[in-house]
Image (cartoon, rainbow, N blue to C red):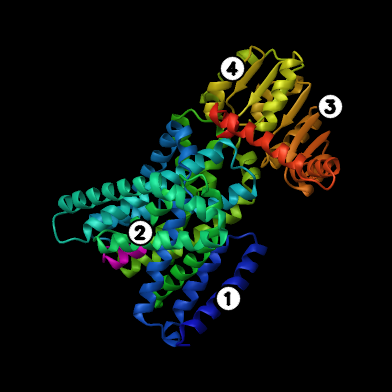
């Protein structure tokens, strides 16, 4: 199988079939790609792929993966909760690195300080692909622990990039501090150039590309490869350049659309990278001696990460539920770790034994943690009593005294345009309104808006919040969360268990979810797609065959949007 097209065709076909199988057993497709790469590496002698082609696959796969990692960074969410994210993220990284170094001392024949540190770092990073997939599938991105996890992912990405900076410094002939200084200067220059391009070029360029969608993918690919090539010519790390190229696009208003169009880049990059990774692995009889070290490493990562989060949660006065969910979600080794391990192998910081251990431990932790994620809620129920010391020590809801005596009030969950209309309506009707949202900016701005509007910064996914916020005494509960199906079903079941017949209203963009909410007792569900279809149907009926009314409605809506933007309304942000 010497022809690359035959090889790639076979690899991609196998990847599709294995991904389908892994999806059936509720495993992430990235694990299938890793397995395909390792299996292909076992037959490297029969495949006959040249060293130059393997190196190309490795480099291109790393560039695409790092570009997507940079593009997916949500700096806005990070800055909103930077204090709690820093305390959790820095603590997690520090604890994991120390434990990783200790494992390196005990399990491996590592001889150099850089090797110890990079080994610890490789065991620190969590898989963004798996973590985001879990949060999306369970619709927990808007939860408190989901927001903290996203922030931790940002911190880990930053730590990974700084690791690449240090790794680049170690590869030079000059002293470490001199090399690091030169690399940091180049990094600052690159960030400055990308900032200027982002302000004056990228915004206008990608505004045009977003309209011409067939060019968006090509423009994004050209952007990342162009920046990587420029970094290579300038004697800088193209990997860091690719990551920062993605980060520069993450600030654009078209970020989500860009992500949607270039998402195939990630899977293509993953397959190329893991195919090359498999060829870099030397699996022989010596792998038997690694069974125990790999098993110990996997166990420490899977079970040690949740334990590490307990003292961090105690010090940050977090409750048991988010603390447990954070630790039990990020307890796997990342694809980013494999990139770092590959670059360390190329730089001769890692030997084959260390590289093989990290690779095998990554596969095991990804598989076992993915299985565990399916039962995370049940596991929390089992461990809730032993973890009660966190709840006793946690920071209580600041406005508990204000809401303790609420009765016959309206509860609004999540702040958006729909919530704004509900709040205005019930305030005019003389009702007290309790708004619960996890955005600190919403809390700060709206808490002083009206005497009957009480804003609560709390985790709506935590059942304790329902008790503490006096939901059982309300006259209406309205959830404005589009991705809140699980918490909404939980609330409906909680109302049934407490024998309360409080009207419950929810929103969704799925007909099947709307039906499930109705079946569980919701009195009214706003299905956004159906509502939009009904509204446009009314407009078309009223206007007949002309287009004047549509144009007039469009002008009115445009004026509302411009007004909201000029006033800096929260619902526009």
User: Nearer the N terminus, badge 3 or badge 2?
Assistant: 2
- Nearer to the camera, 243 or 146: 243
1 vs 2, front mark: 2
SS label for mark 2: helix
User: Nearer the N terminus, badge 4 or badge 3?
Assistant: 4
Spot occupied by residue 3 in the image (x, y as percentages of width and height): 46, 86
Q: Is the magenta stretch mostly helix, strand or loop?
A: helix
For mark 4, does the 10 Å Cα neighbourhood hold few (<14), some (14 to 19), or many (20 or more) residues?
some
Residue 40 placement, left or right of 111: right
2 vs 4, front mark: 2
SS label for mark 1: helix
What is the CA distance from the residue labelled 2 to the residue labelled 4? 49 Å
What is the CA distance from the residue labelled 3 to the residue labelled 2? 59 Å
SS label for mark 3: loop
Boundaries of the magenta span: 340-349
In the picture of the structure, the residue carrying the numbered disc 3 is 501
In the picture of the structure, the residue carrying the numbered disc 1 is 14
């Amino acid at each position: 199988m010497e022809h690359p097209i035959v090889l790639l065709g076979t690899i991609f076909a196998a990847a599709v079939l294995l991904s389908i199988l892994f999806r059936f057993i509720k495993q992430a497709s990235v694990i299938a790609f890793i397995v395909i790469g390792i299996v292909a590496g076992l037959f490297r002698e029969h495949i006959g792929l040249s060293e130059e082609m393997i190196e190309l696959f490795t480099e291109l796969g790393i560039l695409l993966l790092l570009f997507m990692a940079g593009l997916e960074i949500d700096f806005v969410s990070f800055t909103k909760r930077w204090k709690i994210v820093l305390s959790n993220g820095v603590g997690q990284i520090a604890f994991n690195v120390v434990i990783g170094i200790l494992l390196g001392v005990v399990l491996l024949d590592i001889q150099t300080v850089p090797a110890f540190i990079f080994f610890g770092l490789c065991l620190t990073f969590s898989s963004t692909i798996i973590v985001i997939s879990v949060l999306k599938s369970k619709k927990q991105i808007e939860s408190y622990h989901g927001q903290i996890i996203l922030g931790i992912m940002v911190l880990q990405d930053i730590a990974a990039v700084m690791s690449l900076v240090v790794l680049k410094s170690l590869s030079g002939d000059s002293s470490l501090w001199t090399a690091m200084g030169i690399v940091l200067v180049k990094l600052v220059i690159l960030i400055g150039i990308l900032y200027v391009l982002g302000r004056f070029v990228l915004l206008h360029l990608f505004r045009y590309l977003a309209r011409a969608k067939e060019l968006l993918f090509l423009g994004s690919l050209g952007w990342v490869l162009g920046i990587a090539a420029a970094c290579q010519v300038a004697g800088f790390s193209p990997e860091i350049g690719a990551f920062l190229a993605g980060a520069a696009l993450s600030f654009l208003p078209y970020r989500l659309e860009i992500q949607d169009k270039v998402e195939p880049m990630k899977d293509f990059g993953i397959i190329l990278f893991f195919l090359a990774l498999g060829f870099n692995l030397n699996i022989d009889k010596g792998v038997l001696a690694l069974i125990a070290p790999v098993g110990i490493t996997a166990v420490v990562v899977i079970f040690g990460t949740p334990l590490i989060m307990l003292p961090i949660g105690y010090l940050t006065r977090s409750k048991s539920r988010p603390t447990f969910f954070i630790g039990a979600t990020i307890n796997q080794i990342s694809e980013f770790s494999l990139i770092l391990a590959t670059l360390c192998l190329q730089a001769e910081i890692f030997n084959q034994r260390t590289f093989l251990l990290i690779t095998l431990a990554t596969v095991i932790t990804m598989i076992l943690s993915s299985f565990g994620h399916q039962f995370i809620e049940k596991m929390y129920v089992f461990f809730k009593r032993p973890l009660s010391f966190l709840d006793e020590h946690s920071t209580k809801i600041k406005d508990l005294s204000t809401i303790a005596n609420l009765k016959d009030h309206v509860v609004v969950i999540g702040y958006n345009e729909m919530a704004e209309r509900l709040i205005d309506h019930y305030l005019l009707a003389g009702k007290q309104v309790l708004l619960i949202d996890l955005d600190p900016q919403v809390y700060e701005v709206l808490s002083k808006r009206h005497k009957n509007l009480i804003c609560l910064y709390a985790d709506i996914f935590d059942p304790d919040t329902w008790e503490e916020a006096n939901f059982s005494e309300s006259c209406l509960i309205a959830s404005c969360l589009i991705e809140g199906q699980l918490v909404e079903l939980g609330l409906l079941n909680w109302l049934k268990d407490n024998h309360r017949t409080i009207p419950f209203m929810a929103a969704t963009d799925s007909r099947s979810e709307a039906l499930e909410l109705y079946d569980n007792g919701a009195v009214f569900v706003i299905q956004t797609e159906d509502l939009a279809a009904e509204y446009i149907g009314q407009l078309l009926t009223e206007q007949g065959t002309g287009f004047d009314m549509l144009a007039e409605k469009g002008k009115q809506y445009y004026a509302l949007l411009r007004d909201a933007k000029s006033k800096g309304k929260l619902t526009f942000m």
